[in-house]
Every structure is written in C-alpha cells, then in structure tokens.
Image (cartoon, rainbow, N blue to C red):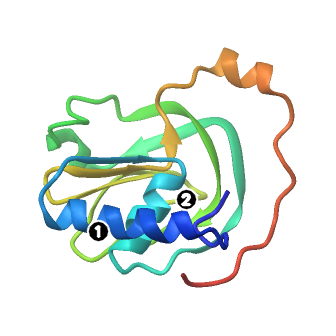
Amino acid sequence: MSVHDDLAWLADERALLRRAVEAGRPVLGVCLGPSQLAAALGASVTMGPAPEYGVGEVHLTAEAFSDPVFAPPPRRSRACTGTGTLSPLPEGAVRLAGNAAYENQAFRIGDRAYGLQFHVEVTASLVAHWGPPPPARRLPTGV
C-alpha cells in the first residue's frame, strides 16, 4: 500500500493526522505512517531509489540521542524495513534515523508526532518466515 493509492480513507487519514499534529496530540506513524504524516504536513512523497525490504541497518542521527523517545539509543540498529516511497521531511521536522537508501527512516514533528519508516516490533526470525518480498512497483511523483 502507498500514500499514492486512490483510496478515500488515505486522504481522510491524512486530514486526521494534520489535525492531530496541529492539536498537539501524540502521533506515531509506522511503515505507511511516515509517508502519510509527511504528506499530511505538506511534504511531497515520491518513489525512492529502490524498494527496501527485510532486515537492515538504520543509523540514528545526533538528534536522536537527545530525543525523549529514542534516547539513549545505540548508534546503529537493525530493523525491519519495507518501503518503496521516499518521504521528505515536512517543514519543521527533525530527522532521527536513516540509512544509505532512505535517509529519512525516522523523524519527529514538534515533541509528540513521530514517523518511523521501519518496524521496531518485528524480529529477524519473524521476517524469515514471511517469504519473499512483493514485486517493486512504480509510484507517481508528488502527492
């Protein structure tokens, strides 16, 4: 699923996310969530350099070390990823993690809204049981 899919509920969800951030409500977007959150706040979500699926490294930024949710983290962490979209940071966002393929793996907006491109709840052994990744698909540019 992508932020670009023609599903009415995706647009409704973006509107809800925008209102939640504006109201200072806690928000946690995982996987599709960061693209939805970024688009809701005006960023243009596009196709990334190549789909990324499986367990890979995520490198935390210096800002992550003082973040109330991420601190104190290890410098590098392995995480389950599954993305093909490139989510630029919305205006005012703080980048918290990235890797060579997708520099914006995690970000924060204000002090209560987070977008995580990776899954912190998934283990490597669980991924191994899922099977091969789905085929890559091209997404339109912009939202």
Q: Amino acid at mark 1?
A: Arg
| Residue drawn at the location 13% of the way across and 62% of the way down | 23
Q: Which residue is mark 2?
A: 102
Q: Amino acid at mark 2?
A: Tyr
Task: For marks 2 and 1, give the one nearer the viewer.
Answer: 1
Q: Position of residue 135 (x, y in %)?
A: 87, 54
Front one among 4 and 123: 4
Callout 2: SS: loop
Front one among 42 and 47: 42
- Determine which quarter of the picture holds residue 139: bottom right
Q: Position of residue 48 (x, y in %)?
A: 64, 68
Q: Position of residue 65 (x, y in %)?
A: 20, 40
Please identify the quadrant where the N terminus is shown. Answer: bottom right
Please identify the quadrant where the C terminus is shown. Answer: bottom right
**Crowd tier of the residue under label 1, counting other residues whose Cα lies within 10 Å: few below 14, some 14–19, many 20 or above:** some
Q: Position of residue 105 (x, y in %)?
A: 46, 52
Front one among 129 and 10: 10
Q: Which of the two discs, 2 and 1, labels the residue nearer the N terminus?
A: 1
- Determine which quarter of the picture holds residue 108: bottom left
Q: Which residue is mark 1?
A: 18
